[in-house]
Image: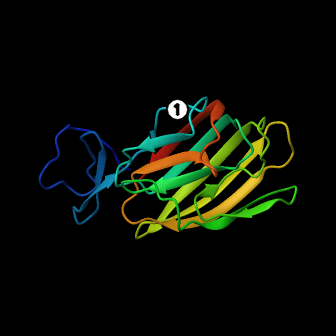
Amino acid sequence: MSIVALTSDTLVASPGAGQIEYNGQFYGTDSNASRAQMQRLVQATSQASTSGTSIDFTGLPAWVKRITVMFQGVSTSGTTRVQIQLGSGSVQTSGYSGQSANIGGTTSTFSAGFIVSENIIATDVRYGTVVLTLLGSNAWTEMGITAIASASTPTSSAGAVTLGGTLDRIRITTVNGTDTFDAGSVNILYEG
């Protein structure tokens, strides 16, 4: 049987095998006393999607390996598709590859961001989740599924992009960049 004990809020110079410590984060050690930081799930502050042309989450830590983007009743004022863009220092608007499709047969390829909703009626209200995963060397993959409350045509999407540096921001916007958000909320959950 193993016992886990948090004994100090200060890291020791030479941790013992299997030791776990706490200093704002958790650390574990293996049989060679090599310390590794174990990241926890971090939920950002939910942002209302009731105004503006984009919703940004910035200041993401360098250790992030997976991000879940959650949509709750998100609507826009126009008829262009909703997309997610990633960035390192600034938002990247090119280099994305992949496709989105809905059950009704509508499909789109994308290059300026990950399209997460095929339905393009101004009154559409979106719900769902998109997962972004670090493949390595600043290459990110995307998969998601969203649905419209009033329709039976969920959208699935998958794609990839390679950033010019370490990801530190996410933007939710529309393909034309001018439609405004007018309902709902968006949040992210990230982990190392």
Q: Residue at 58% across / 30% down in the picture?
A: 51
Tell me residue 4's x, y (percent): 33, 44
- Camera-nearest residue between 96 and 68: 96
Q: Residues within 10 Å of mark 1 (few under 14, many from 20)?
A: some
Left or right for 32, reference 49:
left
Give the total number of marks visible in the rendering: 1
Residue most extreme to the left: 13
Is any atom of residue 41 visible in this view?
no
* Three-letter amino acid code at the position of disc 1: Ser
Tell me residue 129's x, y (percent): 64, 46
The answer to whether residue 113 is above or below residue 169 is: below
Q: Secondary structure at mark 1?
A: loop
Q: Residue at 36% across / 54% down in the picture?
A: 89
Tell me residue 188's x, y (percent): 52, 42
The answer to whether residue 99 is above or below residue 73 is: below
- Camera-nearest residue between 150 and 11: 150
- Camera-nearest residue between 160 and 164: 164
Q: Residue at 11% across / 53% down in the picture?
A: 13
Tell me residue 88's x, y (percent): 39, 57
Left or right for 26, reference 33:
right
Is any atom of residue 23 visible in this view?
yes
Determine the image quadrant of residue 126. top right
The answer to whether residue 2 is above or below residue 109 is: above
Left or right for 129, reference 168:
right
- Camera-nearest residue between 30 and 184: 184
Disc 1 marks which residue?
46
The answer to whether residue 141 is above or below residue 60 is: below
Determine the image quadrant of residue 163. bottom left
